[in-house]
Image: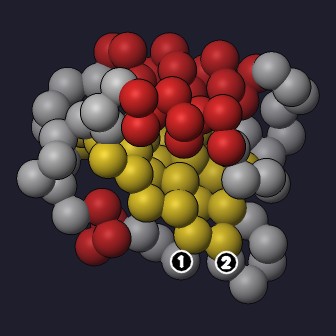
Amino acid sequence: MNKIFLDTREMEHPEPLQSSLFHLKSMSDESYLYMLNIRKPIPLLEIAKEKGFSFVVDQDQNQIWHILISKNQNISLEELLDV
């Protein structure tokens, strides 16, 4: 699996959404996006759902959101979650 890591905690709006959408468009079936954010990215998750991507979202004890997104429905994103 190819992990595409994107840390958006220091980015200003709308950079996190733009960056993540750029990566989603170029992802292969053998890759997934692992994004860190200070907010739950609801617009991104809505777009991912509309486009048929699978995703997992979790907030850690430091209030950081971990978002994993893949277009391959057979990938167990829960196993790749690093919280």
Residue at point 83% right, 32% down? 11
Of the numbered discs in the image, which one, if any, rests on residue 60? Answer: 2
Q: Front-most of 73 and 64?
A: 73
Residue 72 in the image, given as x and y percentages of width and height: 17, 41
Residue at point 68% right, 44% down? 41
In primary-sequence order, the first of circles 2 and 1 is: 2
User: Position of 71 compared to 13: left or right?
Assistant: left
Q: Is residue 32 visible?
A: no
Residue 31 in the image, given as x and y percentages of width and height: 24, 38
Residue 10 in the image, given as x and y percentages of width and height: 85, 40
Outermost left residue: 74
Give me the C-alpha separation between circle 2 and circle 1. Answer: 6 Å
Q: Amino acid at mark 2?
A: Asp
Question: Which corner quadrant of the image does residue 28 belong to?
Answer: top left
User: Position of 54 compared to 50: left or right?
Assistant: left
Circle 1 packing at 10 Å, graded few (<14), some (14-19), many (20+), is few
Q: Front-most of 9 and 70?
A: 70
Question: Which corner quadrant of the image does residue 27 belong to?
Answer: top left
Of the numbered discs in the image, which one, if any, rests on residue 17? Answer: none
* 31 to 1, vertically: above or below: above
Colour scheme of the rendered structure? secondary structure
Of the numbered discs in the image, which one, if any, rests on residue 83? Answer: 1
Q: Is residue 69 visible?
A: yes
Outermost front residue: 50
* 56 to 24, vertically: above or below: below
Q: Secondary structure at mark 2?
A: loop
Instruction: Kindly check if marks 2 and 1 are in contact, taking CB atoms under 8 A apart as contact.
Output: yes
Q: Secondary structure at mark 1?
A: loop
Residue at point 71% right, 30% down? 16
Residue 57 in the image, given as x and y percentages of width and height: 53, 62
Q: Amino acid at mark 1?
A: Val
* 16 to 64, vertically: above or below: above
